[in-house]
Each structure stands twice: as C-alpha cells, then as structure tokens.
Image (cartoon, grey):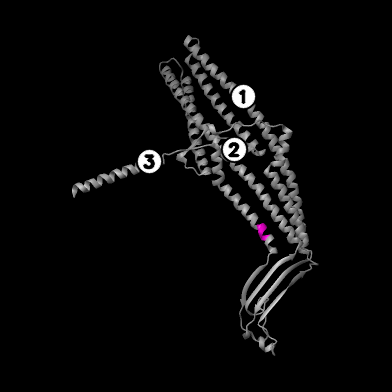
Amino acid sequence: MKPALGLVRVCSYALLTISLAQGTAFAVTTETLSLKRAVQLALAHSPAAGQAAADSQRAFASYREAKDQYLPQFLIGSGLGDSWGYPLSLEGSAPSLVNVTAQSALFNPALRDFVHAARIEYKAIGEENKDRRNQIIQDTVLTYMELLKWEQEIDQLRQQHEEALKAQQIVDQRVQAGVDSQQIGKQARLASARTALRIIQAEGAMDVLRTNLSQLTGVPVNSLQIAPDSVPGFPEIPAKSEELTKTEESNPAVLYAQQHAIAQGFRARAEHRSLWPSADFATQYAVLAKFNNWTQFFQNGVFQRNNATVGVVLRFPFFNPSQHAHAQAADAEAIRATKEVDATKNQVSQQTLKLRRSVEQLRAAQEVSELEYEIAQANVQTMDIKIKSGSSTINEGDQARVDLFEKYNALQDANFQLIQARVSLLRVTGELESWVDQGK
C-alpha cells in the first residue's frame, strides 16, 4: 500500500508541475497587435462605440414610434362594476365584460411631417456616429503611435544614461584629483539626472499608454505587443482649394448639422400643421353585462349584449394660442439649426486651414531638429578626434554628447508632433479610416 501511495503522490506532483508550467506559458503568451487590428478592436470594444450604437437605436425607435401611428393600436380589457340606476360610463366607456378598441391615424398632415423629421434625424445620428467613429480611430492611432515612439526611444535613452553615468564617474575622479572644479562635477551629475528623468518619463508614459490601448482594444496589458511595420506612410497633402471643398462635402460634423437642420424644419412645419384638421380611424366592440341594469332601461328586447361601433373621428382646431406659441418656438429652433450649419462649415474650414498650416510648420520644425541632430553628431565625432589629439578636453567631449542627447530627444518630440498634426488633418478631411486600412 505504501509504495502505491507514494507513486500516486509522485504522479500528482508531476501533473501539478505540468499544469503550472502550461499556465505560466499561457500567461506569458503575447499578441502582436498591428495598427489596423488595434483600430478594429477599438471600434468593437470602445464604450464610445457602444454609446453611438445606442443613440442610433434610440433614433430609429423614435422614427418607428411616429410612423407606426398609422397602424391600428388594439386594446382589450373590461370595465366591471355594479350599477345603481342608469349604468354610467367608466373612464369614457360603458361597463362591460369585454371591451376591444382600435384607433389609428387616417389623415394627419402634422404627423406626416413628424415622421419625415424622425427619419431624417435618424440619418443625422448616423453622420454623428461617423464622427464618433473617427474620434475612436484617432484616439487609437495616436495612442498606438505614441507608444511606438517611446518603445523606439527607450533603448536610446538607456544608452544615453549609461554614457552619462560613465562620464559622471570620470568627472568625479577628476574632481577628487583636483583636475576639474566642483561646478563641472555638478554639471556631469545634472546630465545623468536629466537622462534618468527622461527614462522615468518614458516608462511612465509607456505604462499609461499601454493601459489605455488595452482598454480601447480589449487585449490584456501583459500580452499586448505593437508592430512598428504595420503603420502606413502618410499620403501627400492635396491642394488647398481641393481640400477645403472636399472637407465641407464629406465632413461628418457638417453632414450631421445639415441633416439636423432639415429635420428641425420638418418639425417646425409639423407644429404649424397641428392646427390643421385631422381624421383618425376608430372602432370599439363591447360585451355588456346584464347585472348593470341595462334590462331595466332597455326593455321589450331592445337591449343587446354585443355592441360595435366603427367610424372616423374628425378634429377641426380653430383656437389654440398655446400651440401657436409652440410652433413659433419650433420656427426659432429651425432657424438656429440652419445657422448652425454655416457655423459648422466655418469651423471645419478654419480647423482644416489651421491643421494644414500646422503640418507645414511642424514639418519645417522637424527638418530643423533633424539638421541640429546631424550637426550634434558631427560635433561629437569632431570632439572625439580632438580629444585623441589633445586639442580638446574630456569635459568638452561630454558637453558635446549632452547636446547630442538633447537634440535627439527634441527630434523625437518634433516627429511625434508632426504625426499628431497629420492624423488630425486626416480625420478632418475624412481620410483617416482609409489611411489605417492601408496598413498591414
């Protein structure tokens, strides 16, 4: 028994070890996430996408609510109750065992315009959802690109910090030997402290961006890995006049404002037409009870238990000051919505022009930063040659490397600022999603 029990324990430990190993292997499995795939996941998992879908569903339900008033609305029930004397009505209907009513709009000009307004508002919500969709894409792209920037920069920053620490050690030795002053030692420590601060900033930014990207896409943070090769190149910037015209025609914010203004116009006309005559179809069927004293007032076979009425209800409004005021308020809303279209067009045009100019300026600034970085690289090489020949000091070489580090960091910041402006411009011109689809 004891050898068998020991064998069982050994097998159990082995199975447990295998399970833990498999779980560990599963836990460290990473998923390479391309930019295109990240955007697809964000559009499916983002809370903003769910809110947009709910708003679209609500607008469609409002349209169905208005349109279905032309369909008969059936109601079945009963009005049971005792009677003393002549049977009086209960909530407008005679006391009955069974009561079936049906009613629907037959001729109603106001309702027809309300239906048109609801249908157009549903289309407007679709345009607004496109703008929300573009916002989700922009947030995902910028988060992805900034994370990529820091991941590409972190190795260089760590190398800079190692070189700064080595330079600090050398300077500290020279200060202790009395070759260099305390001020030079402080400058060396400041250079290494700056590189350490930059690393801390990079690591903190990477943690925040990785968490944000995980929340957008639904991919766990520990298994998320981005792919630098999946980012497509930016397209050429079109001519100014062509870009502005295309933006006004295709921008979702402008299209939403236009559709909303049309819907408000139909609502205002519907409020005025609420003062017009209307006709509704109505019918009612009731089974009356004998215990409601009907036989006492309808004798000699006049009383009939099964009763039905079918007809048309006509309405002719002729004096309704409250509705007149309500219609005037709707006219004001329609005018405001029309002016909002012009304001949105102007805003989009100004935003497009500002982004275009910003791209041009940032492109020039990026070129300046790149040239400064190249010059700083050449200065470091020159200083190395001079130090070997004895015409320059080690401190001058260290200062040239500090300047190189600063120029490198400035170049990376300038590159990302240009990317931000290019992505924003693509969103305004309606080309952001198609640009993302060009990636791998």
The span shown in magenta is: 62-66
Q: Nearer the viewer, mark 3 or mark 1?
A: 3
Tag 1: residue type?
Glu
Residue beneath disc 1: 367
Quadrant of the frame with the C terminus: top right
Q: Is residue 132 above or below residue 272?
A: above
Q: Position of residue 161 (x, y in %)?
A: 46, 26
Q: Callout 2: 10 Å neighbours few (<14), some, many (20+)?
A: some
Closer to the eye: label 3 or 2: 2
Give me the C-alpha separation between circle 3 and circle 2: 35 Å
Q: Which of the two residues, 142 or 191, is positioned nearer the viewer here?
A: 142
* Labels 3 and 2: the sequence-earlier one: 3
Q: Which mark is residue 304?
A: none
Which structural element holds mark 2? helix
Say which element carries label 3.
Answer: helix
Image quadrant assignment for residue 137? top right
Disc with the residue nearer the chain's start (3 vs 1): 3
**Residue with the mark numbered 3:** 24
Count residues near mark 1 (Cα–Cα under 10 Å), then give few for <14, some for 14-19, many for 20+: some
Asked whether, in this view, residue 261 is left or right of residue 157, the answer is: right
Callout 1: SS: helix
Which residue position is annotated with label 2?
437
User: Is residue 355 found inside the magenta-colored segment of the image?
Assistant: no
Query: Does any portion of residue 392 appear in the rendered image?
Result: no
- The x, y position of residue 195, in whole percent, is 49, 27
Q: CA distance from mark 3 to mark 1?
A: 47 Å
| Residue 53 x, y percent position in the rendering | 60, 51
From the image, give the main secondary structure of the stretch colored magenta: helix
Q: Nearer the viewer, residue 85 or 35?
A: 35
Can residue 277 be seen from the camera position used here? Answer: yes
Q: Amino acid at mark 3?
A: Thr
Discs 1, 2 touching: Cβ within 8 Å? no
